[in-house]
Image: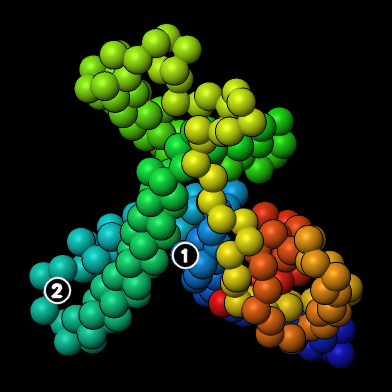
Amino acid sequence: MDIDDILAEAAVDSTPQEAYDLQELTRSWVAERVAPEILSWPGDLMDRVLKAIRRQIELVEDQTGNMDPKTNFRLIIYQTELERFKFLVRSFLRARIKKIDMHPLHIQAQHAASLETLTPLLSPSEYQYLTSHQTLLSSHYSSSFLGQFPVSLQRLDDTTGGISMIDRPDEDKAVFIRALRDVGEVFVEGTDRRFEIKRGDVWVVRWSAIRPWAVGTGTGDVELI
């Protein structure tokens, strides 16, 4: 083996893809729970994670009942890892569904706009849930009290008179962030506050000010913690 072979072998990253996916899933889970608005659906990541969960379930089912002590010990490790992935996925989806329930019309409009890009806001299942949920709510409100109002006052998405009936998330909510790369100078709209964010810095800042650089909405230069 010559020096080129040694260097090539050393350059190969031996870290499995599942480890990177777990790290990315954890980061997306934290960001979704902290951000005041729903973040873009991480389609590629979730596809890999769900496939890994299915493979792990099949592996556990195949090895269940094996009396070999070594196999049983490995099975415990597989099950523990499986439950960790399943917990993160469930909690991640619950956080997103909670936001869909709170701001359905706003998110529906955002999702329609995001279809023009390669990063849709919602997954197909989430969009189906949103439309079905909103249809049921509209039907219930109409039969309960909206039907007694004039037609001009029955819309749930009315924006006339300078007042919007569409609930929106609080984009000025303060969030904790950590810089993954140098961001540069950040300006807080509505104030004269300017500050510089460098790699490794931890800040408490308005979501609206940091959104263009946040994981899930912008360049990914900062992560929510």
Q: Position of residue 61 (x, y in %)?
A: 20, 61
In this view, 157 is above or below 121: above
* Residue 55 found in image quarter: bottom left
Q: For residue 24, say whether it is visible.
A: no
Q: Is residue 23 visible?
A: yes
Q: Which residue does the numbered mark 1 point to in the structure image?
A: 33
Left/right of residue 130 with respect to residue 179 in the rendered view? left
For image coordinates 28% across by 60% down, the residue present is 57
Q: Amino acid at mark 1?
A: Arg
> Mark 2 is on which residue type?
Asn
The C terminus is located in which quarter?
A: bottom right
Q: Secondary structure at mark 2?
A: loop
Q: Residue at x 68, y 73 (%)?
A: 205
Q: Earlier in the sequence, mark 2 or mark 1?
A: 1
Residue under numbered circle 2: 66
Q: Distance from label 2 to label 1 (Cα)?
A: 40 Å
Q: Residue 160, image x and y in percent?
A: 60, 23
Residue 152: percent from left, percent from top:
47, 12
Q: Nearer the viewer, residue 193 or 61?
A: 193
The N terminus, quarter of image: bottom right
